[in-house]
């Protein structure tokens, strides 16, 4: 039997038939049928949402009985919206779109009057909304860390109470939910966000006895979510400085509960995919650390140019023992002073080459590499470092 379809993709049947049976009119017309709680992007944040001038108001969905979603063949969504909520949403939409109170009354009458569309179902029935996954676009995962108001700040010194708050901004296009795993991982250290959360703040402690991360939002609010580890600037001891390292792994999803290649939204050991972002490092410094500064000549791409005509730049770092102006120069990517443009250690300096004025010494400062930054997909299963450090030096003349 051939069923009538909409746009050749969606079966034109009541929601009750789709939701209660794996067959339609006694026959199976699809391979996979599953219940899901994920609202497609179009209704959650896209063109049909209140946020974008549409009618669908996700804030009115406060119980599982309000909205039920069936996905067929891992792509086609049937949303059963309880009719009383649908009418509430439509009435608000009409009011918002009307040019005057009288126009609103006229539009409402034409929609809700007996025999009109707004009166066809009882309040407890479900009207069916349809949407194909990724019809508005594919998720482009991206997030920003802020420790003091500016973008890309993943570090800082704790306050007098021993903690540093960092805000995580999810700026991804077409995302519908996300999972965040804080080191050392595991279920107790994962924050799962159903629906889009534009930003949230996490608290990181660094005292002699406390290296915990504390969730400040969601169901985990107030609980330990993540634990830092003590790291040494020279990779050996505290002579040249120390810091607490926290690691953050994010998965940001678009339409579809799981993306291609993903086992589960909370599984952070799956092979990389478009939602599998590199592990990022967050650096938290204890109160009272020894801070030094120095003047250098900077060039982004050349030791020779830095030495001869580099731009004068003042850098701040923890007190070290073997580098110029009280810094520490490493001999691999895991050693060397982290460099900043301010004494609060919230604004990282640029990667590149820093010449010591009056000498032939040039320090190489990079994130995760000896001659360039290692970021994004190049990180693979490693860590995407956020702050450059003096990983090596070269001696001229060039």
Image (cartoon, helix red, strand yellow):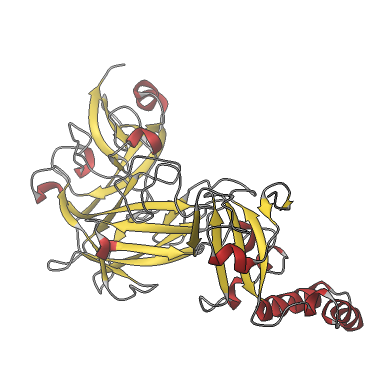
Count all numbered tags in the image, as a single digit: 0
Q: Where is residue 397 in the image (x, y as percent from the top left)?
A: 28, 17
Q: Where is residue 389 in the image (x, y as percent from the top left)?
A: 27, 40
Q: Residue 320's image quarter? A: top left
Name the foreground residue: 216 vs 282: 216
Left or right, 296 with reference to 21: left
Quadrant (top left/top right/bottom left/bottom right) for the C terminus: top left
Q: Position of residue 219 (x, y in %)?
A: 36, 74
Name the foreground residue: 319 vs 185: 185
**Residue 365 in sight here:** yes
Q: Residue 13's image quarter? A: bottom right
Residue in view at x 68 percent, y 68 percent:
50
Left or right, 102 with reference to 5: right
Residue lying furthest top in this view? Answer: 398
Q: Where is residue 158 in the image (x, y as percent from the top left)?
A: 27, 65
Residue in view at x 63 percent, y 62 percent:
43
**Residue 386 in sight here:** no
Q: Measured along the vertical axis of the image, is residue 143 above or below residue 294?
A: below
Q: Measured along the vertical axis of the image, is residue 140 above or below residue 395?
A: below
Q: Residue 225's image quarter? A: bottom left
Name the foreground residue: 55 vs 324: 55
Residue in view at x 56 percent, y 49 percent:
30
Name the foreground residue: 308 vs 11: 11
């Amino acid at each position: 039997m051939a069923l009538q379809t909409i746009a050749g993709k969606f079966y034109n049947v009541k929601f009750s038939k789709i939701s209660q049976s794996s067959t339609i009119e006694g026959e199976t017309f699809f391979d996979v049928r599953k219940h899901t709680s994920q609202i497609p992007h179009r209704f959650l944040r896209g063109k049909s949402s209140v946020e974008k001038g549409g009618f669908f108001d996700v804030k009115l969905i406060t119980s599982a009985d309000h909205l039920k979603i069936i996905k067929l063949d891992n792509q086609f969504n049937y949303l059963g919206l309880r009719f009383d909520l649908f009418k509430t949403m439509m009435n608000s939409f009409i009011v918002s779109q009307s040019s005057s109170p009288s126009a609103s009354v006229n539009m409402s009458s034409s929609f809700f009057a007996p025999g009109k569309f707004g009166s066809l179902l009882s309040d407890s029935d479900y009207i069916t909304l349809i949407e194909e996954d990724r019809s508005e676009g594919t998720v482009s995962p991206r997030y920003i860390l802020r420790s003091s108001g500016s973008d890309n700040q993943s570090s800082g010194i704790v306050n007098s109470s021993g903690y540093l708050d960092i805000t995580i901004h999810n700026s991804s296009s077409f995302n519908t939910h996300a999972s965040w795993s804080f080191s050392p991982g595991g279920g107790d250290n994962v924050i799962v966000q159903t629906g889009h959360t534009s930003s949230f703040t996490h608290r990181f402690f660094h005292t002699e006895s406390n290296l915990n991360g504390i969730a400040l939002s969601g169901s985990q609010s107030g609980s330990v979510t993540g634990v830092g580890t003590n790291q040494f600037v020279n990779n050996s001891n505290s002579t040249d400085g120390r810091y607490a390292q926290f690691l953050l792994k994010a998965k940001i999803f678009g339409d579809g509960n799981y993306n291609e290649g993903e086992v589960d939204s909370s599984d952070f050991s799956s092979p990389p995919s478009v939602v599998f972002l590199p592990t990022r490092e967050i650096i938290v410094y204890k109160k009272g650390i020894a801070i030094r500064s120095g003047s250098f000549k900077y060039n982004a791409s050349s030791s020779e140019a830095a030495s001869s005509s580099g731009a004068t730049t003042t850098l701040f770092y923890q007190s070290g023992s073997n580098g110029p102006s009280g810094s520490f120069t490493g001999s691999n990517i895991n050693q060397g002073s982290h460099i900043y443009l301010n004494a609060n250690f919230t604004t990282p300096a640029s990667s590149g080459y820093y010449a010591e004025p009056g000498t032939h010494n040039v320090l190489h400062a990079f994130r995760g590499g000896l001659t360039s930054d290692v970021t994004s997909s190049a990180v693979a299963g490693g860590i995407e470092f956020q702050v450059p450090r003096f990983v090596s030096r070269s001696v001229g003349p060039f």
